[in-house]
Image (spheres, rainbow, N blue to C red):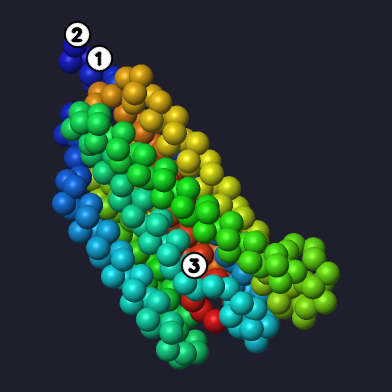
């Protein structure tokens, strides 16, 4: 009887994980569509994209890349800790992940406010007077980094819920599907940034 | 799918993966610093793809998942690559 129950739970968690992956596929195409628009306009307005991209701060971009890569490791570590039944380590690593996500957002805040000081925000008069290609670049920049930042915020909320659930014991070394799926979501946030970073900040 | 033992990543392997990812990021930043035109774009995208593959297989555990999920993920990425390819063919040869 007990053997049968464990088996059923196992299948359940496999299905739950498959569902999460299917959701991540839709996310991939959500950002993928934007990448495609970016690629085509980059090919069409090469010099303007080149000029506009130089406005971006590659240093802030690099720091944020490091934050996200490290946070991806800490969330994977939190899952390892939970699977091993080490609650304290899980909570510690989850908190570090949330902290790094917060630092990413702080950086993003400074990056965007710096642009705003120069009068560059979606629909600003400065932007409207720019050549068409640069207008497109900044439009895509705000759309892509904005949508990504929204995902970071959602990720922070998800991870915080996990902290509460691990504390309460409803996420445990036997039932950790929620933590596993939240970790998958957080890795997706990292994946998207891995492509955004070179496309927007590095290739000028 | 039945009675598989759950694979648990070790902390050590996770740290190793992170070090590799950070090294690739450094290479990417340094190479794009040298302006090589279209080559820069290609190199940056290849490095990004390698990083994504590492994150998916290691951090996201795909390496240790069942064949169905592996095929599904590869299928979706292939589909995305085709979408990009077909769009560019349409754009350049219309």
* CA gap, disc 3 and disc 2: 56 Å
- The N terminus of chain A - image quarter: top left
Q: CA distance from mark 1 to mark 3?
A: 50 Å
Find residue B12 and report its horizontal and vertical position in percent: 16, 51
Foreground residue among A71 and A84 = A71
Nearest to the eye among marks 3 and 2: give it.
Answer: 3
Does A79 sit above or below residue A134?
above
Residue B27: image x %, image y %?
33, 77
The x, y position of residue A131, in whole percent, is 77, 81
- Who's the residue at 34% across and 74% down the image? B26
At mark 1, the secondary structure is helix
To the question of a shared chain for discs 2 and 1, the answer is yes
Left/right placement of residue A110 relative to residue A18 reads right
Mark 3 or mark 2, earlier in chain: 2
Q: Give the answer, above or below, for where A69 lies relative to A197.
A: above
Which numbered circle lies on residue A60?
Answer: 3
How many labels sit on residues?
Answer: 3
Q: Are marks 2 and 1 in contact (CB under 8 Å)?
A: yes
Which residue appears farthest toward the top when viewing the image? A1
Helix, strand or loop at label 2? It is loop
Identify which residue is drawn at 19% across, 40% down.
B8
Element assignment for label 3: helix
Read off the chain for label 2.
A
Q: Are marks 3 and 2 in contact (CB under 8 Å)?
A: no
Residue position marked by numbered label 1 in the rendering: A5
As drawn, the label of residue A1 is 2
Nearer to me, B91 or A9: A9
Q: Residues within 10 Å of mark 3 (few under 14, many from 20)?
A: some
């Amino acid at each position: 009887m007990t053997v049968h129950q464990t088996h059923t739970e196992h299948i359940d968690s496999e299905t739950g994980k498959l569902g999460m992956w299917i959701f991540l596929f839709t996310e991939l195409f959500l950002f993928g569509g934007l990448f495609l628009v970016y690629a085509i306009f980059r090919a069409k307005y090469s010099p303007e994209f080149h000029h506009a991209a130089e406005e971006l701060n590659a240093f802030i971009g690099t720091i944020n890349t490091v934050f996200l890569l490290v946070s991806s490791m800490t969330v994977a570590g939190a899952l390892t800790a939970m699977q091993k039944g080490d609650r304290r380590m899980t909570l510690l690593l989850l908190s570090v992940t949330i902290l790094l996500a917060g630092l990413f957002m702080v950086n993003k805040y400074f990056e965007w406010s710096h642009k705003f000081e120069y009068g560059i925000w979606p629909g600003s008069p400065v932007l409207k007077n720019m050549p068409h290609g640069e207008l497109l670049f900044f439009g895509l920049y705000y759309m892509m980094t904005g949508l990504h930042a929204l995902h970071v915020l959602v990720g922070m909320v998800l991870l915080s819920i996990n902290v509460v659930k691990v504390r309460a014991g409803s996420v445990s070394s036997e039932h950790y599907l929620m933590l596993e799926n939240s970790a998958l979501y957080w890795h997706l946030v990292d994946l998207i940034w891995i492509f955004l970073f070179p496309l927007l900040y590095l290739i000028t | 799918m039945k009675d598989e033992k759950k694979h648990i990543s070790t902390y050590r392997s996770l740290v190793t993966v992170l070090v590799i990812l950070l090294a690739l990021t450094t290479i990417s930043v340094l190479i794009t610093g040298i302006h090589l035109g279209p080559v820069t774009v290609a190199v940056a995208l290849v490095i990004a793809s390698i990083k994504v593959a590492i994150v998916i297989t290691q951090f996201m555990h795909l390496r240790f998942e069942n064949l169905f999920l592996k095929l599904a993920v590869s299928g979706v990425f292939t589909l995305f690559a085709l979408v990009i390819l077909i769009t560019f063919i349409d754009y350049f040869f219309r």
